[in-house]
C-alpha cells in the first residue's frame, strides 16, 4: 500500500532520495479500516498523522447530549489528525471514523517528528499543510458567520463535489450546522428555483 503513497510523494517532494523514502516507509503503518470503524475516540490521545490512500474518513465531535457535529471529511490523498491532541499529547475532544472501507497510512507522533527532523523537505511540506489547513479553517469560520445556509450548502457542493456525493445528507447537514430538515428544504428550494 505504501506504493500508492509514492505518487503523492513524487508530486509534493520530488527531491527525496531513495534513502529518505525508505525512512518514511519504515516509519509508516498500513491499516485497513472497516466502514464505521473508529481511528480516534474522544478522550484518547491522538497518536497518529494519517494519510488516506483509499476511502473516506470523518472527523467529528459528539456533545454530552449525543449530537454529532462533523468537522471535516478527508478523502483520498488527504492528511488528517486532531492537531490539538496530537501536538500537545492531550485527550482528544474529537472522533475520527471511516465512512467507507478505507486504506490508511499512519505515522505515530514520535516517528513523524523524527522524520521531520531527518528530512527537512518533509518538515517544509508539513508546515505548508498546517498553513493550508489553518487557511481552510478560517475560510469555513468566515463562511459560517457571514453566509446563509443556502450559500454554505452551495459552497460545500462546489468545493467538495466528490465528497458531497459520498457523504450521507444528515452528515452534510451536521457539517453545515443545520438540521436535516433545513437541508431538505434548501435542496427542494434550489430544485424549484432551477426548474422555474
Image (cartoon, rainbow, N blue to C red):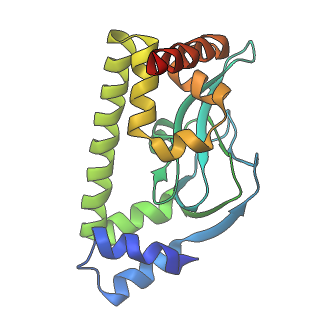
Q: Nearer the viewer, residue 111 or 124?
A: 124
Residue at the image position 40 percent from the left and 66 percent from the top: 114
Q: Nearer the viewer, residue 115 or 181?
A: 181
Residue 80: % across, % down:
49, 49
Residue at the image position 46 percent from the left and 54 percent from the top: 79
Give the quadrant of the C terminus.
top left
Q: Quadrant of residue 187?
A: top right
- Position of residue 9 relative to residue 42, above or below, is below
- Position of residue 117 relative to residue 190, above or below, is below
Residue at the image position 36 percent from the left and 11 percent from the top: 145
Picture mark count: 0
Q: Residue furthest front?
A: 196
Residue at the image position 58 percent from the left and 38 percent from the top: 59
Residue 134: % across, % down:
32, 36
Residue 34: % across, % down:
76, 56
Whether residue 176 sits left or right of residue 142 in the image: it is right
Amino acid at each position: 500500500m505504501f506504493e500508492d503513497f509514492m505518487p503523492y510523494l513524487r508530486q509534493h517532494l520530488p527531491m527525496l532520495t531513495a534513502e529518505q523514502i525508505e525512512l518514511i516507509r519504515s516509519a509508516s503503518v498500513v491499516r485497513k479500516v472497516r466502514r464505521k470503524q473508529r481511528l480516534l475516540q474522544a478522550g484518547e490521545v491522538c497518536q497518529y498523522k494519517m494519510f488516506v490512500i483509499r476511502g473516506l474518513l470523518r472527523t467529528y465531535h459528539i456533545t454530552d447530549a449525543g449530537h454529532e457535529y462533523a468537522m471535516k471529511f478527508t478523502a483520498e490523498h488527504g492528511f488528517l489528525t486532531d492537531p490539538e491532541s496530537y501536538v500537545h499529547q492531550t485527550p482528544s475532544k474529537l472522533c475520527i471514523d471511516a465512512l467507507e472501507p478505507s486504506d490508511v497510512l499512519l505515522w505515530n507522533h514520535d516517528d513523524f517528528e523524527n522524520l521531520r527532523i531527518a528530512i527537512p523537505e518533509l518538515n517544509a511540506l508539513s508546515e505548508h499543510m498546517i498553513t493550508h489547513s489553518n487557511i481552510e479553517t478560517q475560510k469555513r469560520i468566515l463562511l459560517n458567520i457571514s453566509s446563509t445556509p443556502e450559500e454554505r450548502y452551495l459552497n460545500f457542493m462546489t468545493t467538495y463535489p466528490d465528497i458531497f456525493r459520498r457523504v450521507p445528507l444528515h452528515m452534510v447537514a451536521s457539517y453545515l450546522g443545520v438540521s436535516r430538515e433545513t437541508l431538505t428544504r434548501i435542496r427542494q428550494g434550489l430544485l424549484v428555483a432551477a426548474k422555474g
